[in-house]
Amino acid sequence: MTMPALQPANWLGLSSSHLSQIDDHHALLAPAKLAWLAMAKAAAEDGLELNLVSSFRSFQRQQLIWDSKFNGQRAVLDDHHAPVAMETLTELQKIHAIMRFSALPGTSRHHWGTDLDVYSKPLQQQPLQLIASEYQAGGPQFATWQWLQQRAHEFDFFFPYATDLGGVACEPWHLSHAPSAQKVEAMRQPEAILDAIINANVAGQKTIAANFDTLFERFVSPISRLG
Ligand SMILES: [Zn+2]
């Protein structure tokens, strides 16, 4: 399965022309889609239903999330799941608080079509919050996490946010299809991302631009290679 040729608009999430649809709500790059379907089949054979929370997410969708958090219209939570008093923060502090849990538009790995968020619907009695404790011992998705840790590597998936490296918080549900993601990662150009942020008038863009290199180094580049 070869990778389609990608333009910056693809890895920026501005175009979905590189993707293959999975169902009405989800699309991935063809090699990642095949790997996902094979993994879900293997899980089903082990009695575990795997479901997608998120797959491809567009720049526009990421900007809606970003702008509403930056402007105080959507809650930003801290590491203890308590709301952050955004009105008391400087613009840079707001950006740091958001980037702990939500990517800056243009930098999300969900733009690539290589990354997905996974849970098992039948195991989830309460609404899914996507918090790490749901995937830890005693949580409803612990069996999902255990299965993924044992088997996901067979399908070339790894966990870029399985470890808190001080930027993005721990996200055990986030899987990345390594062979596809490595190719997209190699194409990524920070300058093109900043151009897209300015063109789209993303909230806080002046402060983002003034601090772009350090934001990138702290929240975008560091990932766990745990497979
Ligand atoms: Zn994710």
Image: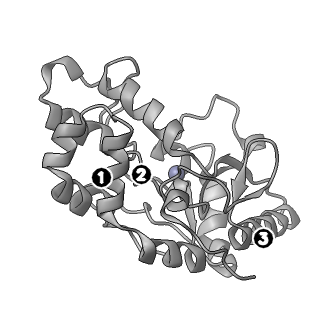
Location of residue 126 (image quadrant):
top right
Give, as a three-letter code, the residue at label 2. Answer: Gly
- Element type where label 2 sits in the image: loop
Say which label, 2 or 1, has the lower sequence index: 2
- Please state which of the two labelled residues, at mark 3 or mark 1, is closer to the viewer: 1
| Residue 22 higher or lower than 99, as above or below | below
Residue at the spot x=57%, y=62% of the render? 175
Residue at the spot x=79%, y=62% of the render? 40
Asked whether residue 137 appears in the rendered view, the answer is no
Asked whether residue 73 appears in the rendered view, the answer is yes
Q: Which residue is mark 2?
A: 106
Mark 2 C-beta to ligand 1 under 8 Å: no
Say which label, 3 or 1, has the lower sequence index: 3
The one of 19 and 115 positioned closer to us in this rendering? 19
Q: Which residue is mark 3?
A: 34
Q: What is the x, y in percent for residue 182?
A: 50, 78
How far apart, in angstroms, are the residues tagged by discs 2 and 3? 25 Å
How far apart, in angstroms, are the residues tagged by discs 3 and 1? 32 Å
Does residue 43 appear left or right of residue 15 in this picture? right
- Please state which of the two labelled residues, at mark 2 or mark 1, is closer to the viewer: 1
Quadrant location of the N terminus? bottom right
Does residue 185 appear left or right of residue 208 in this picture? right
Give, as a three-letter code, the residue at label 1. Answer: Leu
Residue 203, disc = none
Give, as a three-letter code, the residue at label 3. Answer: Leu
The one of 18 and 175 positioned closer to us in this rendering? 18
- Element type where label 3 sits in the image: helix
